[in-house]
Amino acid sequence: MSNFKFSVGPWNVHEGADAFGPEVRESIDFEKKVRKFKEIGLSAVQFHDDDAVPEMNNMSEEQIKKAARDVKGFLDSQGLAAEFVAPRLWMDPHTTDGGFTSNSKEDRDFAMWRAYRSIDIARELGCDKIVLWLAREGTLCAESKDTVESVNRLISSINAILDYDSGIKVVIEPKPNEPIDRSFCPTMGHVMALSAACKDPSRVGGLLESAHAVLAGLDPANEIAFALAMGKLFSVHLNDQNGMRYDQDKAFGVENLRQAFNQVKVLKENNYGSKGEYVGLDVKVMRTQKIEDCYRHIENSIKIFKMLEAKVARFDYELQKKLVAERNYEALEMYVMELLLQG
Ligand code: 3MF
Ligand code: MG
């Protein structure tokens, strides 16, 4: 039995388009995906604002709330919760140069409109978290934005979001690059600094995605631990990534098992989940996968997580203490390898 609850987003089952080729699978209807999520053991759904309310740009605030209420009814009927809503600030023509840090005032205003609507949608869906993946808040051309001014714009935007709803929590998902070259918020340390600079740091935390840490050349478990130490790990996007290349969003643990083990270990040791947090997955189906079997990466991620959870439960803390006292880290390392490799 796992001590954790899992969540996933509808984008995790996608049509397979990449930068070099078109879609290879038919689109699956939102409700069909969600029914399948329930069947494979998920407890909550993660949303982009327009996953919940497609065409929201052309709707009034009241129409948006009403559409979100209908989604909530459907989630209730399936026994699933909503974990968070993330304004999708990277697809729209208004966000070509970023949202909160765009050089265009009109586009910055659009980004705030989407952030406020995301809060409205979150409230209707019964959740109190909005995730900011700051996808285009950075530069392609280093000289195109003033970095000091941009960081201050991020802080002002977050403050405005905090003002809009006194109970909402802002969850920042850092990523060092892709789609931009240089991000203004590349790592969890940057997230914690932004949090500290905001008007209510207790409501601004982080979401660590394993692959994003790897892309920054950092260890995901250490990044998770850093946010935990600050009491500000509000969510995670567990997945895996083969080194510093394009963003892969592979199933959790399939590339670096020891690193995955240490992510589960630090979450378990620090009672992650005890305040209602979910183990979020951000895993993408391989392009090669046939549509008949396109949820397998999610099932595999949960299975691998639970197998690692069982390994963590068997971790011999007495032996660890003894080996640390002896400063015999070679022995400790071998103990971990044997724990992972033996049945
Ligand atoms: C980025 C995210 C999502 C993305 C999604 C797109 C919340 O790592 O987690 O935003 O939208 O991954 O493919
Ligand atoms: Mg993610």
Image (spheres, rainbow, N blue to C red):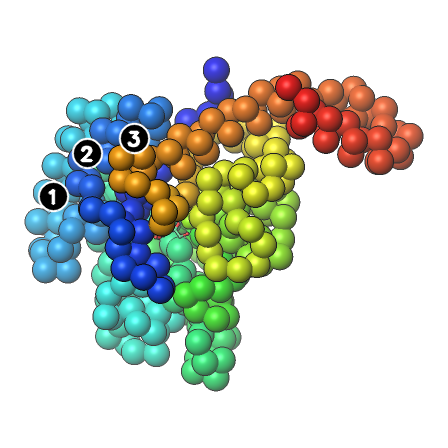
Residue identifier under label 2: 32
The x, y position of residue 120, in whole percent, is 22, 47
Label 1: few (<14), some (14–19) or many (≥20) C-alpha neighbours in 10 Å: some
Tell me the quarter of the picture where residue 55 sits.
bottom left
Q: What element does badge 2 sit on?
A: helix
Residue identifier under label 1: 67
Q: CA distance from mark 3 to mark 1?
A: 21 Å
Give the residue displayed 39% in from the left and 62% down from the top. 135
Tell me the quarter of the picture where residue 221 sits.
top right
Residue identifier under label 3: 37
Residue lying farthest to the bottom in this orientation: 143
Visible residue check, residue 333: yes
Q: In the picture provided, is 217 more to the left or to the right than 76?
A: right
Q: What element does badge 1 sit on?
A: helix
Amino acid type at circle 1 is Ala
Q: Please identify, in this view, whether the residue under mark 3 or under mark 1 is nearer the observer.
A: 3
Tell which circle, 3 or 2, labels the residue nearer the N-terminal end.
2
Give the residue displayed 31% in from the left and 34% down from the top. 293
Q: In the picture provided, is 36 more to the left or to the right than 315?
A: left
The x, y position of residue 308, in whole percent, is 57, 27
Residue lying farthest to the right in this orientation: 326
